[in-house]
Amino acid sequence: MIAGDATPEALDIRLAEAVELGQTLEVILVLRGKVRRVAGGRRWRIRVEGGRVVTFAGDWVVAATPVTPRAGPRRG
């Protein structure tokens, strides 16, 4: 199932189905935010929109792409 082709409800059903069947899934997430190395470790953290922080191991990353900042209100 490709997330871009599915509703959030359909994805939720698919994940629940995998739990019920004991399936192993490959889950691909797209996160956008500022990345920092976790102090004293080999893990990384990213602060996503809304202020939440997600930590992850570097070997989980399959791609990293710079993002053009979104246009916001002009100041001054």
Image (spheres, rainbow, N blue to C red):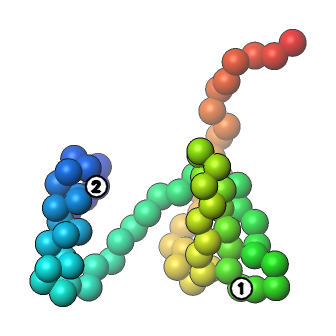
In this rendering, is residue 19 above or below 36? below
Q: Position of residue 3 (x, y in %)?
A: 28, 55
Q: Residue at horizontal 17%, vertical 54%?
A: 10
| Amino acid type, callout 1 | Arg
Question: The residue tagged with tag 1: helix, strand or loop?
Answer: loop
Structural distance between the alpha carbons of marks 1 and 2: 29 Å
Q: Position of residue 27 (x, y in %)?
A: 35, 71
Q: Nearer the viewer, residue 60 or 62?
A: 60
Q: On the rendered structure, is 56 left or right of 73?
A: left
Q: Position of residue 61 (x, y in %)?
A: 55, 74
Q: Residue at horizontal 82%, vertical 85%?
A: 40
Q: How many marks?
A: 2
In this rendering, is residue 7 above or below 39? above
Indicate which disc residue 75 carries. none
In this rendering, is residue 13 above or below 9? below
Indicate which disc residue 3 carries. 2
Question: The residue tagged with tag 2: helix, strand or loop?
Answer: helix
Q: Residue at horizontal 14%, vertical 72%?
A: 17
- Mark 1, other Cα within 10 Å: few <14 / some 14–19 / many ≥20: few
Task: Return the residue found at the far right.
Answer: 76
Indicate which disc residue 42 carries. 1
Q: On the rendered structure, is 12 left or right of 49?
A: left
Q: Position of residue 24 (x, y in %)?
A: 26, 85
Is residue 5 something one can see in this rendering? no
Q: Nearer the viewer, residue 48 or 65?
A: 48
| Amino acid type, callout 2 | Ala
State which tag comes first along the sequence, 1 or 2: 2
Is residue 53 something one can see in this rendering? yes
Q: Residue at horizontal 26%, vertical 50%?
A: 8
